[in-house]
Image (cartoon, grey):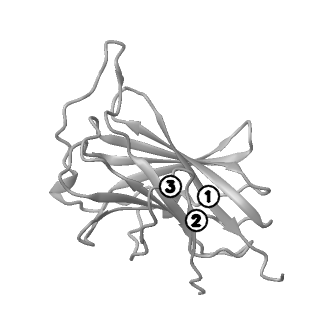
Amino acid sequence: MRKKVMTAIALLPISTLSILATPFFVGNDQNLTSSNFLNPSAEAVKLRDGKTYFVQLPFLLDAETTVNRIYARSATYYFTIALPQNMGEPLQKLEFYQTEGFDAVDFLSNETITYLQLSSGERIAISSKSKTEILPSQDRDKVTITFDPPIPANSQLNSKLIVGLRPVRNPRYDGVYLFGVTAFPQGDRPNSHFLGYGRLSFYDSRY
Protein backbone atom coordinates (compact mmCIF):
# COMPACT_ATOMS: atom_id res chain seq x y z
CA MET A 1 0.00 0.00 0.00
CA ARG A 2 1.37 3.39 -0.95
CA LYS A 3 1.89 5.84 1.90
CA LYS A 4 2.21 9.12 0.08
CA VAL A 5 1.21 11.71 2.63
CA MET A 6 -0.19 15.11 1.73
CA THR A 7 -0.55 17.74 4.44
CA ALA A 8 -3.45 20.15 4.14
CA ILE A 9 -3.82 23.24 6.30
CA ALA A 10 -7.18 24.09 7.87
CA LEU A 11 -8.66 27.52 7.35
CA LEU A 12 -7.91 28.31 11.00
CA PRO A 13 -4.15 27.61 10.91
CA ILE A 14 -2.16 27.65 14.10
CA SER A 15 0.86 25.55 13.25
CA THR A 16 1.81 22.47 11.28
CA LEU A 17 2.08 19.54 13.65
CA SER A 18 3.09 15.99 12.93
CA ILE A 19 0.34 13.52 13.77
CA LEU A 20 1.32 10.38 11.93
CA ALA A 21 1.04 7.55 14.42
CA THR A 22 -0.06 3.97 14.81
CA PRO A 23 -3.85 4.29 14.81
CA PHE A 24 -6.36 2.85 17.24
CA PHE A 25 -9.45 1.56 15.45
CA VAL A 26 -12.70 2.06 17.33
CA GLY A 27 -15.82 0.62 15.74
CA ASN A 28 -19.44 0.98 16.75
CA ASP A 29 -19.33 -2.12 18.92
CA GLN A 30 -15.78 -1.83 20.24
CA ASN A 31 -14.55 -0.38 23.52
CA LEU A 32 -10.96 0.52 24.32
CA THR A 33 -9.64 0.81 27.84
CA SER A 34 -8.70 4.44 28.47
CA SER A 35 -6.39 5.98 31.05
CA ASN A 36 -7.62 7.75 34.18
CA PHE A 37 -6.90 10.91 32.22
CA LEU A 38 -10.31 10.41 30.60
CA ASN A 39 -12.35 10.54 33.80
CA PRO A 40 -14.50 13.71 33.59
CA SER A 41 -14.33 15.96 36.67
CA ALA A 42 -15.16 19.49 35.53
CA GLU A 43 -18.09 21.55 36.72
CA ALA A 44 -20.75 22.21 34.10
CA VAL A 45 -21.01 25.60 32.42
CA LYS A 46 -24.78 25.80 32.23
CA LEU A 47 -27.00 28.83 31.76
CA ARG A 48 -30.58 29.40 32.90
CA ASP A 49 -31.91 28.22 29.56
CA GLY A 50 -30.33 24.82 30.24
CA LYS A 51 -27.72 25.12 27.47
CA THR A 52 -24.11 24.13 28.08
CA TYR A 53 -21.19 26.05 26.59
CA PHE A 54 -17.43 25.80 26.19
CA VAL A 55 -15.41 28.42 28.08
CA GLN A 56 -12.31 27.93 25.92
CA LEU A 57 -12.90 26.42 22.52
CA PRO A 58 -11.03 23.47 21.05
CA PHE A 59 -9.73 24.42 17.60
CA LEU A 60 -8.91 22.62 14.39
CA LEU A 61 -5.18 22.62 13.68
CA ASP A 62 -4.93 20.78 10.37
CA ALA A 63 -6.10 17.90 8.23
CA GLU A 64 -4.31 15.44 5.97
CA THR A 65 -4.89 12.33 3.92
CA THR A 66 -2.60 9.33 3.71
CA VAL A 67 -3.43 8.83 0.00
CA ASN A 68 -4.24 11.77 -2.29
CA ARG A 69 -4.88 9.93 -5.57
CA ILE A 70 -8.45 10.19 -6.84
CA TYR A 71 -10.66 7.12 -6.46
CA ALA A 72 -8.05 5.30 -4.37
CA ARG A 73 -8.98 2.94 -1.55
CA SER A 74 -7.37 2.53 1.89
CA ALA A 75 -6.99 6.26 2.58
CA THR A 76 -7.49 7.81 6.01
CA TYR A 77 -8.36 11.46 6.56
CA TYR A 78 -6.75 12.66 9.80
CA PHE A 79 -8.02 15.74 11.64
CA THR A 80 -5.96 17.26 14.48
CA ILE A 81 -7.84 19.22 17.14
CA ALA A 82 -6.08 21.17 19.90
CA LEU A 83 -7.64 20.88 23.35
CA PRO A 84 -7.33 23.91 25.68
CA GLN A 85 -6.47 23.35 29.33
CA ASN A 86 -9.89 24.58 30.43
CA MET A 87 -12.78 23.98 28.06
CA GLY A 88 -15.25 24.57 30.90
CA GLU A 89 -17.32 21.60 29.75
CA PRO A 90 -16.32 18.09 28.62
CA LEU A 91 -16.23 17.44 24.87
CA GLN A 92 -19.07 15.04 24.11
CA LYS A 93 -19.37 14.94 20.33
CA LEU A 94 -17.84 15.98 17.00
CA GLU A 95 -19.52 16.26 13.61
CA PHE A 96 -17.72 16.12 10.24
CA TYR A 97 -19.45 17.06 7.00
CA GLN A 98 -18.31 17.82 3.47
CA THR A 99 -19.02 21.36 2.29
CA GLU A 100 -17.05 21.60 -0.96
CA GLY A 101 -15.86 19.24 -3.71
CA PHE A 102 -17.03 17.92 -7.07
CA ASP A 103 -17.83 14.45 -5.73
CA ALA A 104 -19.56 13.28 -2.55
CA VAL A 105 -17.28 11.25 -0.25
CA ASP A 106 -18.84 8.27 1.56
CA PHE A 107 -17.37 7.09 4.87
CA LEU A 108 -17.08 3.79 6.75
CA SER A 109 -18.61 4.39 10.17
CA ASN A 110 -17.14 1.25 11.77
CA GLU A 111 -13.49 2.17 11.08
CA THR A 112 -13.20 5.55 12.78
CA ILE A 113 -9.91 6.26 14.58
CA THR A 114 -9.78 8.32 17.80
CA TYR A 115 -6.95 8.92 20.26
CA LEU A 116 -5.21 11.63 22.28
CA GLN A 117 -1.61 12.50 21.55
CA LEU A 118 0.31 14.08 24.43
CA SER A 119 3.26 16.44 24.05
CA SER A 120 5.46 13.59 25.34
CA GLY A 121 4.45 11.51 22.32
CA GLU A 122 2.30 9.16 24.40
CA ARG A 123 -1.00 8.15 22.82
CA ILE A 124 -4.13 7.47 24.84
CA ALA A 125 -6.91 5.43 23.26
CA ILE A 126 -10.40 6.93 23.42
CA SER A 127 -13.59 4.91 23.42
CA SER A 128 -16.04 6.36 20.91
CA LYS A 129 -19.02 5.50 18.76
CA SER A 130 -19.45 6.82 15.25
CA LYS A 131 -22.55 7.18 13.11
CA THR A 132 -22.78 8.08 9.44
CA GLU A 133 -25.91 9.64 7.98
CA ILE A 134 -26.72 11.36 4.70
CA LEU A 135 -27.60 15.05 4.77
CA PRO A 136 -30.86 15.21 2.76
CA SER A 137 -30.24 18.73 1.45
CA GLN A 138 -26.78 17.93 0.08
CA ASP A 139 -26.82 14.15 -0.46
CA ARG A 140 -23.52 13.94 1.41
CA ASP A 141 -22.39 12.05 4.49
CA LYS A 142 -22.23 13.55 7.95
CA VAL A 143 -20.11 11.59 10.42
CA THR A 144 -20.98 12.00 14.11
CA ILE A 145 -18.47 10.79 16.71
CA THR A 146 -19.62 10.51 20.34
CA PHE A 147 -17.00 10.07 23.06
CA ASP A 148 -17.80 7.67 25.89
CA PRO A 149 -16.79 8.90 28.42
CA PRO A 150 -16.61 12.53 27.25
CA ILE A 151 -13.17 14.12 26.99
CA PRO A 152 -12.57 16.04 30.28
CA ALA A 153 -12.85 19.82 30.33
CA ASN A 154 -9.80 20.42 32.52
CA SER A 155 -6.35 19.12 31.74
CA GLN A 156 -2.86 20.09 32.78
CA LEU A 157 -1.52 18.08 29.86
CA ASN A 158 -0.75 19.57 26.47
CA SER A 159 -2.73 17.21 24.27
CA LYS A 160 -4.21 16.98 20.81
CA LEU A 161 -7.24 14.98 19.75
CA ILE A 162 -6.66 12.92 16.61
CA VAL A 163 -9.64 11.74 14.58
CA GLY A 164 -9.25 9.56 11.49
CA LEU A 165 -12.11 9.04 9.05
CA ARG A 166 -12.00 6.17 6.56
CA PRO A 167 -13.65 6.88 3.18
CA VAL A 168 -15.02 4.07 1.06
CA ARG A 169 -12.93 5.57 -1.73
CA ASN A 170 -11.32 8.89 -2.45
CA PRO A 171 -13.42 11.20 -4.65
CA ARG A 172 -13.55 10.47 -8.38
CA TYR A 173 -12.64 14.01 -9.39
CA ASP A 174 -9.54 15.99 -8.49
CA GLY A 175 -9.56 19.33 -6.72
CA VAL A 176 -9.98 20.83 -3.27
CA TYR A 177 -12.41 19.27 -0.81
CA LEU A 178 -13.50 20.97 2.43
CA PHE A 179 -14.84 19.23 5.53
CA GLY A 180 -16.46 21.26 8.29
CA VAL A 181 -15.87 20.26 11.93
CA THR A 182 -18.32 21.13 14.73
CA ALA A 183 -17.88 20.39 18.46
CA PHE A 184 -20.57 19.80 21.10
CA PRO A 185 -20.10 20.08 24.88
CA GLN A 186 -21.66 17.59 27.25
CA GLY A 187 -25.26 18.26 28.27
CA ASP A 188 -28.89 17.81 27.29
CA ARG A 189 -28.88 21.13 25.39
CA PRO A 190 -25.32 21.61 24.11
CA ASN A 191 -24.41 24.80 22.28
CA SER A 192 -22.41 23.68 19.26
CA HIS A 193 -19.29 25.50 18.02
CA PHE A 194 -17.88 25.40 14.50
CA LEU A 195 -14.13 24.69 14.67
CA GLY A 196 -13.15 25.28 11.04
CA TYR A 197 -12.63 23.49 7.73
CA GLY A 198 -10.25 20.64 7.02
CA ARG A 199 -8.87 21.20 3.51
CA LEU A 200 -7.81 18.19 1.44
CA SER A 201 -6.57 18.14 -2.16
CA PHE A 202 -6.76 15.16 -4.51
CA TYR A 203 -4.92 14.59 -7.78
CA ASP A 204 -5.28 12.54 -10.94
CA SER A 205 -2.05 10.52 -11.21
CA ARG A 206 -2.44 10.30 -15.01
CA TYR A 207 -1.46 13.95 -15.42
Which of the pair 154/22 is nearer the observer? 154
Eyeballing the image, is 61 above or below 91? Answer: below
Query: Helix, strand, or loop for circle 2?
Result: strand
| Residue 8: numbered disc | 2
Circle 3 or circle 2, nearest the eye = 3
Q: Which part of the image, by quadrant, shows the N terminus?
A: bottom right
Residue, disc 1: 199
Mark 3 and mark 2: span between their CA atoms? 10 Å
Q: Amino acid at mark 1?
A: Arg
For the point 31% across and 17% down, the residue is 47
Give percent across and percent down for residue 49.
36, 13
Between marks 2 and 1, how big is the CA–CA gap?
6 Å
Please tell me which of labels 3 and 2 falls first in the chain. 2
**As shown in the figure, which amino acid type bears the numbered disc 3?**
Pro
Q: Amino acid at mark 2?
A: Ala
Q: Position of residue 46 (x, y in %)?
A: 29, 22
Q: Does dot 1 land on a helix, a strand or a loop? A: strand
Task: Give the image location of residue 109, x and y in percent.
Answer: 54, 57
Circle 3 residues within 10 Å: few <14, some 14–19, many ≥20: few
Looking at the rendered image, the quarter that the C terminus falls into is bottom right
Say whether residue 75 is left or right of residue 174: left
Q: Which residue is mark 3?
A: 13
Whether 44 is drawn above or below 167: the answer is above
Residue positioned 74% across, 41% down in the render: 138
